[in-house]
Image: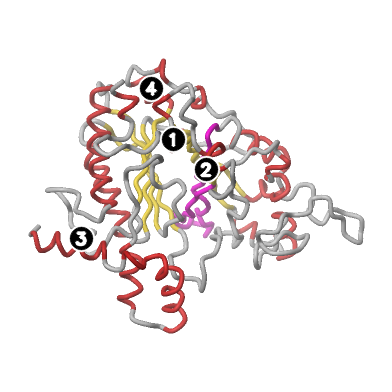
């Protein structure tokens, strides 16, 4: 690759950066409405970048990207702490370059040669088994204890757990694939892929204004997420600096679930029945008790017939924090579609990823309650699962996990 090629990529990654926020919120909507110059809109999407270094890893609080890949690795036989540290050093160096819109290195494949960073994020986590493989079992957090079984689980062990976990997201499919391929190549002989899943969300600029994403059931999904503006957001999502494991300060725990949606059964329901299952209007995500998407549902409201307006088994009721002793998690999923079965049944659903400071206080109590009586359970199936410790963001000159692997 010539110096001119590299300079051109860097230019594409910085064009319009000074006004990126205004262009994304206003310019993209204008393009959708008026059919303006496609190059301008695409350059705006491509120019957005996310910093690699910081208090937290990227890919947790950043907006949902249009494309995503989740991949788990197991350390190769004989590989231990030394090999894991070298791998994390390679991966961190690669992630920093790619997220800045730069080539991966001398072996870059050129897949993303013409694009800017496109909001690329690469996030790294450690599974429970990683600590045994690296001789660090004494430093394994109790928060990585195995998740309890749930009655609706039909988990495939081959697509669950893993020593290492990587989450990749970008607003361009080629940029996302390029990152995935580079991470895989960087693993070398130190680790091998255990499982890999591909996801997607709505593309930036596809709606007239920024909106909460819809899932493949057509429902607005993510309304009840905790907001960074809330005073207890950090305590719910991120591990405090004064915790038992200093290497996890600023980090979070990711629960990953492949949830298949039984769309043929769901789509047989009437609109009214779908809304009763969820407890919200399908059109705008507002609770059935009225208002807008952000209106708090009135869980005590009864209709003229004397029944609860939001049924007692509605998903919105059972998953509400006030129904779960305040338990909350930051959901950041991707949808997936892996083709059709011979009978035409779609293998489609949600790559559910949620973030919390402690899964025993976040995911587990909510899922236990959903497991006992959520009307939505009839229409979904949990097919894979994983739990990963995601360390805080690296400082300049540091690699992800260095405070665990070298102290």
Q: Which residue is mark 3?
A: 10
The residue depicted at 67 percent of the width and 45 percent of the height is 319
Q: Nearer the viewer, mark 2 or mark 3?
A: 3
Labels 2 and 1: the sequence-earlier one: 1
Give the secondary structure at mark 1: loop
Mark 1 packing: few (<14 Cα in 10 Å), some, or many (20+)? many
Give residue 17's quadrant in the image.
Answer: bottom left
Q: Is residue 244 left or right of residue 94?
A: right
Q: Which residue is mark 4?
A: 131
Vertical placement of residue 407 versus 184, above or below: above
Q: Which mark is residue 276?
A: none
Region rendered in magenta: 331-358
Does the segment drawn in magenta span residue 348? yes
Does the segment drawn in magenta span residue 45? no
The residue depicted at 55 percent of the width and 58 percent of the height is 215
Q: Nearer the viewer, residue 185 or 405?
A: 405
Q: Which mark is residue 251?
A: 1
Quadrant holding the C terminus: top left
x then y, percent, for residue 270: 72, 65
Q: Which residue is mark 2?
A: 354
- Disc 4 and disc 2: Cα gap in Å? 22 Å
Give the secondary structure at mark 4: helix
Give the secondary structure at mark 3: helix
């Amino acid at each position: 690759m010539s110096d001119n090629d590299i300079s051109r990529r860097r230019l594409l990654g910085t064009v319009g950066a000074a006004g990126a926020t205004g262009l994304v919120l206003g310019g993209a909507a204008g393009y959708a409405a008026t059919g303006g110059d496609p190059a301008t809109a695409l350059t705006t999407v491509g120019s957005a970048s996310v910093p690699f270094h910081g208090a937290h890893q990227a890919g947790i609080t950043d907006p949902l990207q249009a494309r995503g890949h989740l991949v788990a690795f197991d350390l190769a036989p004989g590989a231990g702490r030394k090999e894991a540290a070298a791998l994390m050093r390679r991966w961190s160096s690669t992630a920093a370059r790619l997220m800045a819109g730069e080539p991966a290195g001398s072996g870059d494949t050129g897949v993303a040669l013409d694009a800017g960073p496109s909001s690329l994020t690469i996030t790294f986590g450690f599974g429970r088994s990683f600590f045994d493989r690296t001789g660090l079992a004494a430093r394994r957090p109790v928060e990585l204890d195995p998740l309890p079984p749930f009655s609706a689980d039909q988990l495939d062990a081959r697509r669950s757990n893993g020593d290492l976990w990587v989450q990749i997201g970008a607003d361009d499919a080629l940029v996302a694939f390029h990152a995935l391929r580079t991470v895989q190549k960087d693993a070398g002989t130190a680790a091998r892929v255990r499982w890999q899943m591909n996801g997607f969300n709505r593309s930036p600029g596809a709606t007239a204004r920024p909106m909460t994403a819809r899932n493949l059931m057509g429902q607005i999904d993510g309304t009840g997420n905790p907001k960074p503006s809330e005073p207890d957001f950090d305590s719910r999502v991120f591990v405090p600096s004064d915790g038992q494991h200093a290497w996890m300060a600023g980090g979070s725990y990711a629960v990953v679930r492949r949830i298949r949606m039984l769309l043929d059964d769901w789509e047989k329901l009437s609109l009214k029945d779908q809304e009763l299952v969820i407890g919200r209007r399908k059109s705008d995500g507002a609770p059935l008790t009225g208002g807008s998407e952000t209106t708090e549902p009135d869980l005590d409201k009864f209709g003229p017939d004397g029944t609860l307006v939001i049924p007692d088994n509605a998903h919105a009721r059972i998953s509400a924090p006030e129904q779960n002793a305040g338990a909350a998690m930051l959901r950041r999923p991707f949808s997936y579609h892996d083709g059709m079965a011979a009978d035409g049944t779609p293998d489609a659903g949600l790559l559910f990823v949620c973030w919390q400071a402690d899964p025993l206080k976040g995911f587990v109590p909510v899922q236990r309650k959903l497991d006992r009586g959520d009307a939505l359970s009839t229409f979904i199936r949990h097919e894979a699962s994983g739990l990963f410790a995601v360390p805080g963001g690296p400082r300049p000159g540091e690699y992800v996990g260095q405070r665990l692997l070298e102290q």
